[in-house]
Image (cartoon, rainbow, N blue to C red):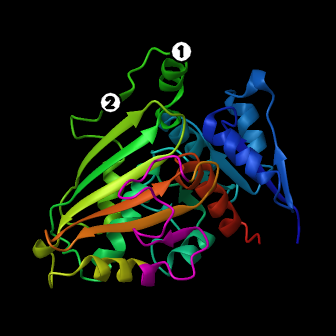
Amino acid sequence: MAMRTIFIDGDSGTTGLGIRERLAGVPDIHLLSIAPEVRKDPTAKRKLYGEVDLVILCLPDEAAKEAVTLADGLAGSGPRVLDASTAHRVAPGWAYGFAELNSAQPAIIAASRRVANPGCYPTGAIALIRPLVDAGLIAADHPVTVNAVSGYSGGGKSMIEAYEAGKAPAFELYGLGLEHKHIAELHAYSSLKHRPIFVPSVGNFRQGMLVSVPLFLDALPGRPTGADLEAALSRHYAGSELVKVLKATDGTLRGDRIEALGLNNTDRMELRVFANEARRQAVLVARLDNLGKGASGAAVQNIKLMLQLG
């Protein structure tokens, strides 16, 4: 296989560093770099964009939009682009980079010239909701609430600095204006008709994530059991390398508790259904590393699909 050339625009940030570390072990890839003094120089970046097969954007939203405009202006079709920002996740002409969305999504990602890497919170929420909507176990017009907690590394440079300096609270809810930037993709790719209520939070730990969706079982079509929900999720992710559906009583948890750090430093995601049949209630839970399957790990998964790497 011919060597594939990649440029990570913004490789000094958390996601960019994670991608670079993961790509170090992938054969047939050559990473190009830009001198620090010209990293924001459009002329230098344009030249580098024209020399690579794939540009990975680990930039703030506005800078990512500018970078795509630059790439689009190159002669020919320009490089392929994988954007890790929020800027293009619901934009026309962009493939959504959650490969497990459905059976067709890996091929869509592989064929696309523009791919948007998913957000960490939507990765967990969509993984739980979309298969159940597709299976008819959650109605598309059902009102859904998503609650989640992440380590502070998902909050960007200022949040990381605040926590590591001991200047941030131990735990806090945020996004309480109900306009969190991840809601658009969560809504679009979960196949829900109504915009879900999303309540994120951050804890005083560097990385790790739990996403939960509470459900009243008798309010769902056909009044399913928790086992029905688990079975539908298991069918959807059968054969998946990175996403596993586990039983709530699989022996790896401490009773009826689940902690957020269990998949740190991996690119995996675990899904569970916790149900109380007597009360006819259930909670769907996704666990992942917000820096792994929620960011850099997902990016490398998409890179391998886009460049047809093993």
Is residue 45 shown left or right of residue 136? right
Q: Residue 31 appears at what percent x and percent y?
A: 82, 48
Q: Nearer the viewer, residue 305 or 225?
A: 225
State the separation of the CA atoms marked 2 and 1: 17 Å
Task: Note whether 142 is above or below 70 in the view shown.
Answer: below
Point 32% across, 30% down: residue: 172
At label 2, counting other C-alpha atoms closer than 10 Å, the crowd grade (few under 14, some 14-19, many 20 or more) is: few
Q: Determine which residue is flagged by label 2.
A: 172
Spot the residue most to the left: 219
Task: Note whether 85 is above or below 29 in the view shown.
Answer: above
Q: Type of residue at label 1?
A: Ala
Magenta region, residue range? 234-262
Q: Residue 106 appears at what percent x and percent y?
A: 57, 74
Task: Note whether 5 is above or below 249 in the view shown.
Answer: above
| Quadrant location, the C terminus | bottom right
Q: Main secondary structure of the magenta part?
A: loop
Is residue 19 shown left or right of residue 97? right
Residue 97 seen anywhere in this rendered image of the structure: no
Is residue 220 shown left or right of residue 252? left
Q: Type of residue at label 2?
A: Glu
Q: Determine which residue is flagged by label 1.
A: 165
Q: Is residue 106 magenta?
A: no
Q: Nearer the viewer, residue 45 or 28?
A: 28
Badge 1 marks a residue whose secondary structure is loop
Is residue 177 shown left or right of residue 3? left
